Image (cartoon, rainbow, N blue to C red):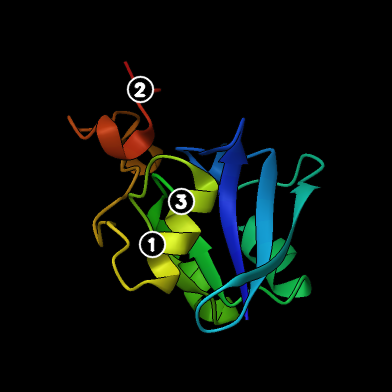
Amino acid sequence: MKIAVTYENGQVFQHFGHTEQFKIYTVDDENILSSEIVNTDGTGHGALADFLKERGVNVLICGGIGAGAVMALRDAGIQLFGGAAGGADDQVLSFLGGNLHFSSEANCSHHESGECDGNISACGGHCH
């Protein structure tokens, strides 16, 4: 199985659509077998779902994410765990151990309204 994490300086990057790198892990049921950091080369938002699908990713762990990207990931068959924070490696190990802390409501609603609607933490704090 392959797990992708939005990635910046060892941490889960907090805005899926603006991520410049993913760390992609090849795992078995309990262990990380290998990992690589891949650049998105300017690909953004919904197109990132295809980027991940082309690389065989089954699971995405990220911070905030917009509704359009959620639907694109669903259409690509990629299971989403949004609202995660902290070290990327730690989050993957938590996922493998069955105790990943995530939020099913980690949406960046500012894409539709021009504001973060008070949900700044889900947007990685970039809305003002």
Question: Is residue 33 in sight in this rendering?
Answer: yes
Q: Residue at x 52, y 47 (%)?
A: 88
Dot 3 lies on which element? helix
User: Contact (CB < 8 A) between labels 3 and 2?
Assistant: no
CA gap between label 1 and label 3 equals: 6 Å
- For the C terminus, give its image quadrant: top left
The three-letter amino acid code for the residue at tag 3 is Asp
The residue labelled by disc 3 is 90
Most foreground residue, 127 or 11: 11
N-terminal label among 2 and 1:
1
Q: Relative to the observer, which residue lies in front, 7 or 125?
A: 7
> Which of the 4 image quarters holds residue 57?
bottom right
Query: Please, which residue is most extreme toward the top here?
Result: 128
- Which residue has dot 2 on it? 127
The first of marks 3 and 2 along the sequence is 3
User: Gap in Å between the C-alphas at discs 3 and 2?
Assistant: 27 Å
Does residue 47 appear in the picture of this structure? no
Do labels 1 and 3 touch, CB within 8 Å? yes
What's the residue type where badge 1 is placed? Answer: Ser
SS state under label 2: loop
Residue at position x 74%, y 47% in the image: 43
Horizontal side, residue 98 vs residue 87: left or right: left
Question: Which residue is drawn at the image coordinates 32% and 73% (left, top)?
Answer: 98
